[in-house]
């Protein structure tokens, strides 16, 4: 079964969605199921720059981070098929969506603002939520980004009340 899944992986799987929708956790499950490489874009950027994301935002600003994100996406998309977990804001640049559309399947993970809040509330690595760690702000930002997420994706999976394993299996079914 797994080897069958393995040879079917001919293009990347990009996981997109708002912060706290489970992109990183689910991509690690997909990696185990598909036996392919898995890359977390945020982690790759941190590794490459030697700087944590909040520090990068503080010292160089959001635009600098967004540029790093596009560069990283270009590099990764040119490599062998992998599961790529994107940052929550990756879809905000049309050129990023173009890169993803040309090299893989785009899977949108969704969750309610309440679920997102529960998952991210103790995190310290998301400068976008600094000083706004509440359901109302999350709901507002999610609404603002909704159209970008919806128009970028090929398939969507709701993650509320599901385990990472359930979500990963659902994605495999949809991407077959
Ligand atoms: C961001 C989401 C973060 C990270 C950065 C900006 C965003 O990734 O890329 O802090 O703009 O939504 P996660 O979605 O993995 O938290």
Image (tube, rainbow, N blue to C red):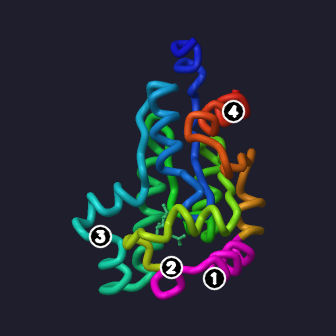
* Residues at discs 1 and 2 in contact (Cβ within 8 Å): yes
Q: What numbered label is drawn on residue 154?
A: none
CA neighbours of label 4 inside 10 A, class few (<14), some (14 to 19), many (20+): some
Viewer-proximal residue, 5 or 123?
123
Q: Which mark is residue 175?
A: 4
Residue 129: assigned label: 2
Residue drawn where x is 67% and y is 68% of the image: 113
In percent of the image, x 59 and y 40: which residue is there? 163
Is residue 141 part of the magenta span, yes or no? yes
> Residue 162's x, y, as percent?
64, 43
Query: Which is nearer the N-term, disc 1 or disc 2?
Result: 2
**Seen from this angle, which residue lies furthest left?**
50
Q: Position of residue 108 (x, y in %)?
A: 67, 52
For marks 4 and 1 on the same chain, the one whose residue lies earlier in the sequence:
1
Q: What stretch is highlighted in magenta?
A: 130-145
- Residue 55, located in which quarter of the rendered image? bottom left
User: What is the CA distance from the residue labelled 2 to the residue labelled 3?
Assistant: 15 Å
Which is in the foreground here, disc 1 or disc 3?
A: 1
Q: Mark 1 points at which residue?
A: 137
Mark-to-mark CA distance, 4 and 1: 32 Å
Label annotation for residue 52: 3
Q: Gap in Å between the C-alphas at discs 1 and 3?
A: 23 Å
* In the image: residue 47, left or right of residue 107: left
**Residue under the point 40% across and 60% down:** 42
Q: Quadrant of the N terminus?
A: top right
Q: Is mark 1 on a helix, strand or loop?
A: helix
Q: Is residue 158 above or below residue 111?
A: above
> Considering the numbered disc 2 on the image, is that residue within a helix, a strand or a loop?
helix
Mark 2 and mark 3 lie on one chain; the one further toward the N terminus is 3
Is disc 3 placed on a helix, strand or loop? loop
Q: Quadrant of the C terminus?
A: top right
């Amino acid at each position: 079964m797994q080897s069958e899944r393995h040879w079917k992986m001919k293009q990347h799987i990009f996981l997109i969605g708002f912060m706290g929708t489970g992109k990183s956790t689910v991509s690690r499950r997909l990696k185990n199921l598909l036996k392919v490489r898995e890359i977390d874009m945020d982690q790759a950027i941190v590794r490459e720059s030697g700087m944590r994301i909040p520090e990068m935002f503080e010292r160089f600003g959001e635009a600098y981070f967004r540029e790093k994100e596009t560069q990283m996406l270009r590099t990764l998309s040119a490599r062998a098929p992998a599961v790529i977990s994107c940052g929550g804001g990756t879809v905000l640049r049309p050129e990023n969506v173009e890169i993803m559309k040309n090299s893989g399947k785009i899977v949108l993970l969704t969750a309610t603002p309440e679920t997102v809040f529960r998952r991210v509330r103790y995190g310290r690595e998301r400068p976008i939520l600094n000083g706004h760690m509440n359901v109302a702000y999350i709901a507002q930002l999610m609404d603002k980004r909704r159209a970008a997420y919806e128009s970028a994706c090929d398939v969507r999976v709701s993650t509320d009340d599901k385990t990472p394993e359930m979500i990963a299996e659902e994605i495999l079914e949809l991407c077959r």
